[in-house]
Image (cartoon, grey):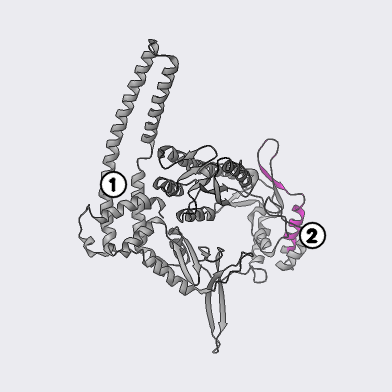
Amino acid sequence: MKVALYCRKSSEDSSKQIQSIENQLEVLREKARREDLHIVKVYSEAKSAKKPYKRAAFNQMLKDLQDGKFQAVLCWKLDRLSRNPIEGGIIQHYLLEGTLKEIITYERRYYPSDNSLMMNMELGMAAEYSIALGKNVKRGMNYKVSKGIYPNTAPVGYLNVTPLNGEKLIENDSERYLIVKKLWDLLLTEKLSMADLAKKAAAMGLRTRATANVPEKKISIHGLHCMFANPFYYGMFRWNNELHHGKHEAMISKEDFDKAQKIISSKKTAPKTTRYEFPIKGFILCGECGASVTAEYKNKKRADGSLNERIYYRCTHRRKDFNCKQPMLREEDLQTQILDILDSIEIPEAFLSWAKKWLLEFSKGESERQKALRVVQKNQLNKLDNQIERLIELRINEEIEADIFKLKKDALVLEKKTIEREMNLNTEADDSRIDTTIEVFEFCKKAKHLFETGDYEGKRMVLNALGSQLYLENKKLRIELAKPFTLIQNALSEKWILDPRFSTLKTPTGSSETTFICELIKNGATDGI
């Protein structure tokens, strides 16, 4: 069987991982050898799976799966594939529909014919673990802040230390503290530029602290600006956009800090700031080599003395092993192509109004079905309780052997727990998916207008909401829309969604419109915005 091998860890620091990527590869390749699995491609990355659509290797693996390059996925555990409900739902959908024939982990296998409850639970536990971990980290950081301890890496001149009592503190760095204080004194004389101060720092041997991934290096001019603008040096620290009093030793006074801010904001020392914002930057990959697409500003003086200002998007050519020859594309041409894509998913107001009414009726029906299902489940639990009580009576009266009693009781208890888990699942899930479907419709209605008239943040919000990967090749933009937008795009191409009768149509109906929205709720909303 052709399989894809997927390995992931959340941190670049392998010391923080129970199983590093190298260990996962070694163990899983040995498993593939023992079980005669043919690994066609290895996908590995050091990325968190907490948020969807953020892992390039995972996204590429899903694309290759759809292209039929392999039939199964081999990974360490299910939580390596996903820690969020959206991508977990995608994986499970591919497995249930048969696109993915099998998921093979180190401990077990998952097949399309399996009961999906256990897989739902494992993926749900992985997502819950990620959420709980984030809450615990935030709680720990907020506790440190309340004690006056900066809950992050100390700036240059200070050190994060952990005494024997285990309480993490920030103390002076014996190697750098005096050098940094000397730089503050030199800045306050107002006799040296930032470039001169950077040279002085290098001459005095000041270097940043090395980390697991970044070696020590000289302090740059930009680094000096950040250092001199940091309130940490006069005894405060900024956290969640608020200033807090720190327990660490202040290096300068508040008066000297205020004076320093006036000095570094002067024209002589202020850092250069760009006048241009590139809203589409960061969303596009090169369709030829896969590198990111960046933006740059160019101007050319015309014969009459005026400037011809243009913004171009081009491949960064980061891959040194690939001779990418993709040309540049003007921003206005790129925006036109994006507007064409947004136009292809823009639904009319009449259909949006009808769909909201239909979904309200559908939600009411689902609530009734949920109530009926719970009645059935309670009856099943009562029946199982009676069976367990009868089994206990038989054992007390010694009418059944101990090993048979244990076997039958365990089977009944397991069945009871399964039903209880199903009853404890979030009964609001369908309402949530319906709300998401309405959000998708409303986004499609206004996305083109928002992008066309919006500012920098507005344009980026639209691109981010698409939840898609964009590729630029031969000056043509290619986009892989998320499932709900693909469904809407297809419906619009068939024209029936544009019918003005939706302004007066009663709901619900038994027509293709109903089928379309049910399909969107079932397969689309879980991939939604």
10 Å neighbourhood of mark 2: few (<14), some, or many (≥20)?
A: some
10 Å neighbourhood of mark 1: few (<14), some, or many (≥20)?
A: some
* Snapshot quadrant of residue 494: bottom left
Q: Residue 33: x, y in percent?
A: 59, 43
Outermost residue toward the top in this view: 397
Q: Residue type at mark 1: give it.
A: Ser
User: Residue drawn at (28%, 37%), measured in percent from left and top?
Assistant: 371
Q: Residue 169 magenta-drawn?
A: yes
Q: Residue 19: x, y in percent?
A: 61, 42
Residue tagged 1: 363
Q: Residue 371 magenta-drawn?
A: no
Q: Give residue 204's mark.
A: 2
- Left or right: residue 380 versus residue 409 is left
What's drawn in magenta, residue-wise? Answer: 160-186
Q: Secondary structure at mark 1?
A: helix
Q: How many marks?
A: 2
